Image (tube, grey):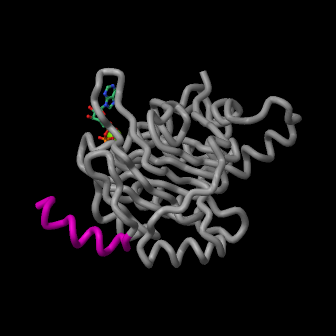
Amino acid sequence: MKRLLQVEGINVQASHLKLDGMARGKAMNHSQKEFHQVSLDKVSYSWPSGTPAIRQCSFSIPGPGLWMLVGSNGSGKSTLFKLLSGLLKPEFGTLTCSLKVALVFQNPDHQLLLPSCESDLLLSLSQKLNISKKEHIINTALEQVGLAGMQSRPIHTLSGGQKQRLAIAGALVSEAKLLLLDEPTALLDPASQQTILDIVQQLSHRSDNPLTALWITHRLEELDQSDGAARMENGQIGPWQSGNQLRKLLQPLAS
Ligand SMILES: Nc1ncnc2c1ncn2[C@@H]1O[C@H](COP(=O)(O)OP(=O)(O)O)[C@@H](O)[C@H]1O
Ligand SMILES: [Mg+2]
């Protein structure tokens, strides 16, 4: 079984969606034009049981950066990720995703399969590459997530935060450009939580090939570290706003 679920080139086409001023500014900075590589236009999806999960949802990611989604249980966040990664197909509407996708789950034990860091990362690499190229890619990815030199470390000896970093390294070696992170820090202590945030921040703001990260969180304090945040409710996503603004709006409701 492939550990990281990767898809690329779903239904590539232009889509024009409403963004608020902040997100529109971001989009223009990144691409200088209003074309979004990841967008939904009036997408709906109901599970075979008949449960509607995504309802006429329109949404786009302005460009590379760290974008956060927040919403109550059952609002459709994980279903959205399944649609973006190609595991599910929209029943109605248009979904555009021209970036290669990698998923990072809340519990890294659900996606790390092999005994050592290196063997696990090899799963995400093209088998066509020669050994020295594979080693180089793996070493670089481990370095980028702060696990340099841990190629032969047994995975069961890693902390939760280190396992999550390894899951991100898997995304890097797969050359994914869109990271979908479903509550990646929910099981981590505050220090590991911040490390994961810092790594994803860095990867999504590096000057060479910045990633697009869409991060689902229940931890409102994380919103402040995003480039923009949106609220998901009843299968629909609200406009992008600053994470700080959204946190202030939601905090009274959470207490
Ligand atoms: N595998 C599934 N089969 C049937 N219904 C599902 C399944 N997964 C989620 N749902 C339903 O879809 C809706 C959205 O769920 P989900 O996307 O998991 O929300 P969230 O991630 O925001 O908690 C909920 O009503 C949930 O019960
Ligand atoms: Mg969920």
Residue 3 falls in image quadrant: top right
Number of numbered discs: 0
- Where in the figure is residue 85, as x and y percent of width and height? 54, 39
Q: Is residue 225 left or right of residue 94?
A: left
| Nearer to me, 209 or 34 | 34
Q: Quadrant of ligand 1?
A: top left
Which residue sits at x=13%, y=62%? 253
Q: Quadrant of the C terminus?
A: bottom left
- Is residue 163 something that shows in the picture? no
Q: Main secondary structure of the magenta part?
A: helix
- Is residue 217 something that shows in the picture? yes
- Where in the figure is residue 55, as x and y percent of width and height? 34, 43
Q: Is residue 182 left or right of residue 166?
A: left
What range of the chain is rendered magenta? Answer: 241-255
Q: Examine the structure image and report whether residue 231 is included in the region drawn in magenta.
A: no
| Nearer to me, 163 or 75 | 75
Q: Is residue 172 left or right of residue 85?
A: right
Which residue sits at x=44%, y=69%? 19
- Where in the figure is residue 17, as x and y percent of width and height? 48, 62
Q: Is residue 17 above or below residue 157?
A: below
Q: Is residue 134 left or right of residue 122?
A: right
- Where in the figure is residue 129, as x and y percent of width and height? 85, 35
Q: Quadrant of the N terminus?
A: top right
| Nearer to me, 148 or 13 | 13
Which residue sits at x=52%, y=45%? 94
Q: Is residue 90 above or below residue 142?
A: above
